[in-house]
Amino acid sequence: MQVRSADDIRDLLRTERRRRGLTQSQLADLTGTSQKWISDFERGRVDPPLSIVLKVLVLLGVGIDLAPPVLSPPDEPDQGEDF
């Protein structure tokens, strides 16, 4: 999955939490946060520190693989043109 916004991460977190059969309260207990925080995050009401987001995602077993974009080489001029 390509993540392009905080909403993408919110959706992923919610989906994975539900897929594992966890309530917001159970996830909160496992991550040392509160049920209200999990709810607020999933609904876009808070933008938490990256460290907390990573902790929750790792606990849910979501791997994070960052890679730079693949850049295409610049166009090369035709061999027959004189410059």
Image (cartoon, grey):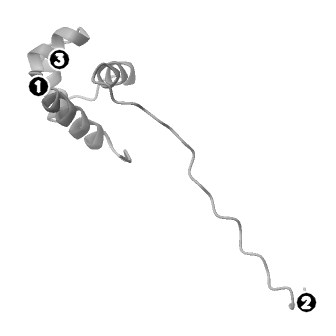
Distance from label 2 to label 3 (Cα)?
Answer: 66 Å
User: As drawn, is 39 to the left or to the right of 46?
Assistant: left
| Residue 24 appears left or right of 48 | left
Q: Amino acid at mark 2?
A: Asp
* SS class, disc 3: helix
Amino acid identity at mark 3: Leu
- Per the image, label 2 sits on a secondary structure element best described as loop
Q: Are marks 2 and 1 in contact (CB under 8 Å)?
A: no
The residue positioned 27% from the left and 24% from the top of the image is 60
> Where does label 2 land, which residue?
82
Mark 2 and mark 3 lie on one chain; the one further toward the N terminus is 3
Real-space Cα separation, disc 1 to disc 3, in angstroms: 10 Å
Instruction: Work out whether 10 lies above or below 78.
Output: above
Q: Tell me how many marks there are.
A: 3
The image position of residue 76, as x and y in percent, is 77, 76
Crowding at mark 3 (Cα within 10 Å: few <14, some 14-19, many 20+) = some
Quadrant of image for the C terminus = bottom right
**Secondary structure under the numbered disc 1 in the rendered image:** loop
**Disc 1 vs disc 3: Cβ atoms closer than 8 Å?**
no
| Residue positioned most to the front | 20
Residue corresponding to mark 1: 21
Residue indicated by mark 3:
27
Q: Please provide percent x and percent y for residue 31.
A: 25, 12
